[in-house]
Image (spheres, rainbow, N blue to C red):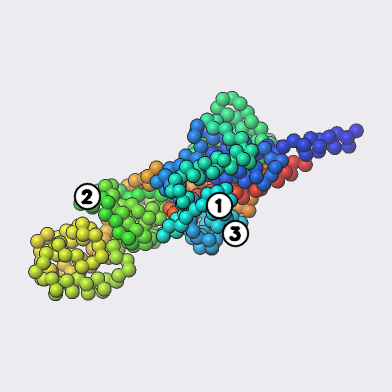
Amino acid sequence: MADVQLLLYLFSLASSPLQVLVIGGGAAGFFGAIACAEAHAHAHVTLLETNRTPLTKVRISGGGRCNVTHACFDPALLVQHYPRGGRALRGAFSRFQPRDTVSWFAQRGVRLKTEADGRMFPVTDDSATIVDCLMQAARHAGVNVRTGTAVVGLTHSASTFQVELKSGEVITGDRLLLATGSSPQGYALAKSLGHTVEPPVPSLFTFTVSDPELRSLAGVATESAQVQLILPEQKPLEQTAPLLITHWGFSGPSILKLSAWGARLLHDNHYRGILRVHWLPGQSPDHIRQQLMAAKQQQGKRAIAATCPLLLPRRLWQYLIARINIGSDQRWADLSKQQLHNLIQEVTQSQHLIEGKGVFKDEFVTCGGVSLKDVDFKTMQSLRCSGLYFAGEILDVDGVTGGFNFQSAWTTGWLAGQAMGLDSRS
């Protein structure tokens, strides 16, 4: 009799679909849900999203164009763009990397293009193309997408999860993927199941500088600048990339990269520090001196402010010379040795006081999240709670600007989706 009951139990497991629940309707959640449903026909996948409209960050990313990924196809080089999580992602990228992302979208009719800086966008330059692709793939795979569905509680017993919704409904699942991004609720759910959460702080952001003369140059940009972040008792952090002056201070790829690498340190220093700028990183002080001396000899009667011998925007040049007290009418012939020295210093080591942080448009990336020590990056399964998986920004993983954060979402979501559907209930 006992044997018959066991056989009936095993038959019921084999005949009933594996219930997979995904909490979070962002890039990682959708990608994980689709990957699971496509790879495992016996899995019934339900995606729960608090907002009425899913994929919000995908819609607004890249100024509405969606920076899908980056054209870096070597995992060893790719991980160098992640201030946190690079080591853990090394193996993950060997299984699903940007080349696979490009192929995944291409197979579903979406072609990506590569821009000069390596960023990859849909050829339509419209994020709706990516959103529509993900929504259609989810429908085609049979994913049950439930929007406007807030999760308020989560418990785990034996081999099942009970997810309590704000409506009072309780949903039971055999597998659970947490892909809630930087949501405090997601962190709370992870903590409730025994996970350590590294305190989340902003990552990609701009620098606020109170200098009104600098801020009056809003819109001025350089193709390349070497920026150093100087904080008390810390080794300077450095990046070289385009720099943009804004009406609140500094922005552009160089600043965003610097903010990512210095996210935790800047938070601990209340977003105050010194930014040192070399406005012409490809040129040595001696080379700059030669150009300035040539101007002094050849254009002695002309005003310094009206004649810039360096490859700098005119308004920026006038700002820099004003900072070292060179008058608007002073001629090149009257440039003293001390002024020459000060000018070279200003071009190569211009210093500005950071007095706070701004934001990076409408996009928000955090440093912090579920500790990577709690996760198996081969499957994205929790090492503390069997059947629980993580993907995306809920993890203590973040990349610099350029499509790297989306790539970690695609990769971790895909790995989780492949692993969640493996039925070991019997």
Of marks 1 and 2, the one in the foreground? 1
**Residue 19 place in picture, x, y as percent:** 68, 37
In the picture, the disc for residue 106 is 1
- Choose between 164 and 15: the one closer to the eye: 15
Query: Callout 2: helix, strand or loop?
Result: loop
Q: Earlier in the sequence, mark 3 or mark 2?
A: 3
**Is residue 32 in view from this perspective?**
yes
Marks 1 and 2, Cα distance to the nearest angstrom? 45 Å
| Residue visible at 61% across and 35% down in the picture | 144
| Residue visible at 51% across and 37% down in the picture | 54
Task: Judge from the rendering whether residue 95 lies leftward or rightward of residue 86; answer left or right.
Answer: right
> Mark 3 — residue?
94
| Residue visible at 20% across and 68% down in the picture | 309
Query: Callout 1: helix, strand or loop?
Result: helix
Q: Are marks 3 and 1 in contact (CB under 8 Å)?
A: no
**Residue 275 place in picture, x, y as percent:** 31, 57
Query: Callout 3: helix, strand or loop?
Result: helix
Which amino acid, mark 3?
A: Ser
- Choose between 59 and 388: the one closer to the eye: 59
**Residue 92 place in picture, x, y as percent:** 59, 55
How many marks do you count on the picture?
Answer: 3
Q: Earlier in the sequence, mark 1 or mark 2?
A: 1
* Crowd tier of the residue under label 3, counting other residues whose Cα lies within 10 Å: few below 14, some 14–19, many 20 or above: few
**Is residue 265 in view from this perspective?**
no
Q: Is residue 173 above or below residue 196?
A: above
Taking the view exactly as shown, the residue that stands out farthest to the top is: 168
Of marks 3 and 1, the one in the foreground? 1
> Mark 2 — residue?
216
Which amino acid, mark 2?
A: Ser
